[in-house]
Structure formats: C-alpha cells, structure tokens
Amino acid sequence: MHSLLEGNDACVVMPTGGGKSLCYQLPALVVGKTVIVISPLIALMQDQAAQLRQMGIPAAVLNSALTSTQQFQTIHRARQGEYRLLYLSPERLAREDTIAWLRQVPVGFFAIDEAHCISEWGHEFRPEYRHLCCLRQQFPELPIAAFTASATRRVRHDILNQLQLRNPHKYIASFHRPNLRYAIQECAPSVQLELLVQGLRHYSIGSVIVYAPTIARVEETVDFLGDHRIAAVPYHGQMETDLRRKNQERWMSDEVRVLVGTIAFGLGINKASVRAVIHLSLPKSIEQYYQEAGRAGRDGEPADCVLLWQKRDAGLLAHFIEQITDPAERERAWERYHVMRAFVESNACRHRQICLHFGELPKWASCGKCDACASKPEWLSTRLEEPNPRVPSTGSALTEKPSRPGDQVRTPTVDPELREYLREWRRTTAKQQRVSAFIVMYDTTLEEVCRKRPTSLAGLLQISGIGQRKLELYGQQILDALARFGHGVRAAPLPEKAPPPAEETKRLLAEGRTLEEIATIRGRQVATVVGTVATLLEKGELELQAGWVDPQRQPIIEDACARLGLQSLKLLKEALPEEVSFEEIRLVVARLRRKQVLDSQNTPASPQKEAD
C-alpha cells in the first residue's frame, strides 16, 4: 500500500484469501482519485463493486452487460471523478475509444488483477492481456500494480517485462497455507464417486467445492449425489447466466452446502467457511491446483484439499494437449503436465513441493499436515465394500458425525437455530437488493453476531465486518432480527428436498416426456439424462422405449455389440457409422447388459455346481 501511495510500480504475489484486493482498494480511498482495476471476470468485478458500494465507496463496472445508455453514464461519471474504483475487462481496455476517454479520468494508478494471465508461461494465459502493455506507453507517469495468487518465478519475470514495470517493489508472500491438509489418492472409476459420498457425509459443517473435469461429469456427479440424498448444485460455462448465478448464490448463502463445478467456478469467490475442496480429476498444472484448492480454509480454520484422480485423467489431459496447435504453447502444456504428474505420484511433503514450485525455499522438511507427512482424512482411508454406482455403501464410514478436517468433532460455539435465522434474514435481504449474500454480511461477521448477540447499535459497531456504512444499512434490521429470535421466532423450514434425480426422471418418463424435454425441465444436457436412463435400464427399472433409438440403427448397434462386446462404448462408437449417436449406443448397451444379467440368472446350474 505504501509503495502505491508513494507512486511506485508493484508486483504482489499473495495466496488466495491473502488480501490482494485490499492492497489496491484502500489506497484508492487515500489518493482520492480513480483506481482502474483490470479484471478477467465480469461476475468477480460486479461482486467487488457491489461490495464496495455497500461500504459507501463509489465503485462501478464497465462491461458489455450494460446497456449503451448505462455505459455512457458510467463513462461520464468516471470523467467527473465520481468513482474511487472503476473495473474494466482487458477486452474493454483494448478498444481504441477506451484510451481516449480514460485520458479525461483523474486516474490514480492501474491495478492488474490475475496478472499471471499476461504470461504465456502462466496456466491461464489470455492473449487479450497482452494489450495491457499499452498502459505504460499511454500513461507513462502513472503507477502500475500487478496482483496474482499463483505465479512461478518465471511467470513473475514475464509479468514485469510484459507490463514494462519500472523498478517495481516486489512483495512475494509465502505460499505455505499451514491450515490446509493436502491428500491425494489414485482410485478406480467404480470407487471414486463412492469415496466422494463418504467425504461429503464427513464434512457436515461448512461448505464444500467439488471440481469435475467436464460439463458432463459435473451434471452426472450432481445427479449421483442427489440419488444418495446429498443436495448439490452444478456450475459450468454452458448454463444460462441467471441459473449459474442463482446456483452460486444458493451455495454462498448456505442454502446448499455442496457445489460441483468446472474450473469456470471460483475466481474471486469470497467464502470463508469452505471446509473442503475435492478434485475429481488431475488439474492441468500445480498453479491451477494451488489456486483452486486454496479456496478452502480462508477463515484460517483447518480445511482439506483432496485430489481423487484416475489413470485415465492423464490420458484425457494428454489428448487435450495434443490438440494445441501452437508448438510453443503445446510444449509449455506438456511441461506443466509432467510437473503435475510428478506431484501426485510423489511421496514427498505436499506443502514443501508447492513452495519449491513457486520458488520458495522452506526451512522445514516436513509440514506434519499432508498425507505424505502425517495422515489422510479418516474417510479417505476407510475401505469401501463392493461399490455400487447407485446404492450407497453402509457401515461406520458413512455415519453423519459432525466433524472437521483433522478428524476432530467441532463443538458448535453458537446457537445453530440463531445462525440459521440470521442466514435466512441475510438471504432475504440479498435477494431484495439483488446482490450476493456475502456482500450483505460475511460468514465470519454473522458468526460473531451470533456469539455476542449485541443489543445496541454501539454494540454492533464492535463486530468485525460492521462499519459505519453497514450499520446505517443493516444495523437496526440485525437488532430487530435478534429481538424476534429472542421472542421465539425461528427460520422457516427449508423447501422439501427434491426427489432423487433417478426418481424424477422416471416420473417425467411416466408422464410421456421425451428425453429432450426432461433435459430442459431438469436443467441438464441430454447426455446426462441418457446416462440416468441407461443406469435405470441396467437395473431393470425401465424398459427401452420406442423413439429413444432409431429403429434402423438399433440392429446395427446390437450387431456391433455382439462382435466387440459391451465393455467399451468408445470402441463401439469408432466401429459404427458416424450418424449413430453415442447416446443411442449407451441405451442399447444398457439394455443388452441387463439382458446378459437376466440370462446368467436363468441359466440352470450344472449338477456338479449344485452338489457343491
């Protein structure tokens, strides 16, 4: 902060949750000019701007989501110097007209968020970030500050060069997050989701993020969890924006504890009480893994970062790497792949490996926390009994004990009914104002209100996270909510849980709905619905219906199955004509597998076997 206030360039590398945003937001108030923040994600910019406005700090976002009138008004107010912070995307900055009107804005300095995106060596390289070099040329007198959570030494040097920083002050925080427990386990496809169920029943307090590699895997995982009575919401790039934001908000406000997403989820997520981040496939790089896993435990409390990977993940990553047309980028991707593969297959301290990767040399050899130095979470070490993809395992491993990372029972320090009542007030208030729940009140602030139960506005001011502006907006509302609770009012019961996805699919089929209609109703891809139907076919709970498979293609598929077997859908797809869809193959194979089971059950045993 002092470096920026003194007019120096800066390069700041801090882990997720380390306070990077504060490093440019607070100086923006002190200098009294407009700080231009370049950020890659619209949702992140909107949340930060809304959060600042809640604190009485004038801030705005300029992006394509605004109408032309709104954009004009924002630019006009920026010229008048009305904003302390103005958020732009790199694409907006690259427009020729942007530089022209920026010259008329009283700019204090430029802050580049997620600065690793400017480097070809970075794990999230974005070509449009290359245009940021124009800032030094067009505004040579203004300081530039680069912020990132995941930059190796090579990437840091590239950032300095690309942004043409002048004698920058460098602040590199430690990459060691001692409250996180890293645990990595290779597992078979038939076991992975059962392990996930065990894990989610273990983390009965706090929230969980599950990362899946593809959109299809996200939806399949959410449905699998739903069939095991674990509520989860999906998040991926092909969802409608409103639904994606609604799902994120349900998770942020604790309405649903588990969110299953692709890597599209997470940048800038400011939720402190994430007790676990579970990956269901190999990340592309150490940087990506560190960034995503780092969303756990932002409150400083113990949290688990679990990576359940399969050998086929490596093949999938290799396939995508080979699709990269630029030879240099392909070589960089292979380098990241080999480092990631060595990380998961190593028995060395996970924390130490991460620190060394980012150029930090720890003075310790063992962290005493990760699976290599200490132990895995209890649920990860428990042997599964004959996994079944639709039937939950039984036994002590799945008991819903209120536990936390470190396998210790967490004693509640607040009245859970009061916590839920205040969460309900927060959800309602956030919906009325059309902002995220955490913008109204942080989880940590809500917990402190529950513990201290202030009875006056002066008492509320003693709560961390409640300043004068928050007090004006919500102070009396919070006191009123506490008073109502004291008089016996409680949170309304949450809506009855939706039926398991498989049961819902059967019901819709019974109504005569097509597979496409069911996909629309359930907010899923057709392939996900077909997967559910295929499982029901194999279990004998459904029969193959006319219209699901082209009648002329069905005998061709069955013939291929007779020749090649029922194990590899990929092999069958390659052998069949191009017009035969993967979904049709999956349904026919499911029916034949069911028939195979019935035939084996109806085959009379030999006299010798009967005697045995």
Image (cartoon, rainbow, N blue to C red):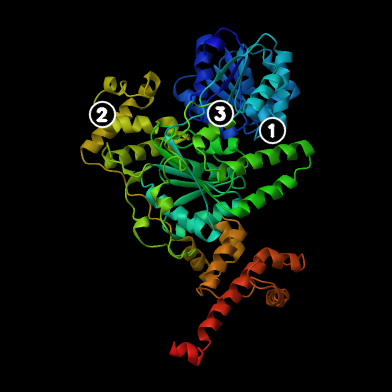
In depth, the one of 592 and 440 nearer the eye is 592
The residue labelled by disc 3 is: 149
* Marking on residue 396: none
The residue labelled by disc 1 is: 126
**SS for callout 2:** helix
The quarter of the picture where residue 559 lies is bottom right
**SS for callout 1:** loop
Q: How far, Cα to Cα, is label 3 from label 1?
A: 16 Å
Q: Amino acid at mark 1?
A: Arg
Q: Residues within 10 Å of mark 2 (few under 14, many from 20)?
A: few
Residue 581 visible at all: no
In depth, the one of 563 and 466 nearer the eye is 563
Q: Residues within 10 Å of mark 1 (few under 14, many from 20)?
A: some
Residue 38 visible at all: yes
**Relative to residue 58, is residue 460 drawn left or right?**
left
Disc with the residue nearer the chain's start (3 vs 1)? 1
The quarter of the picture where residue 101 lies is top right
Which residue is farthest bottom? Answer: 607
Q: Amino acid at mark 2?
A: Lys
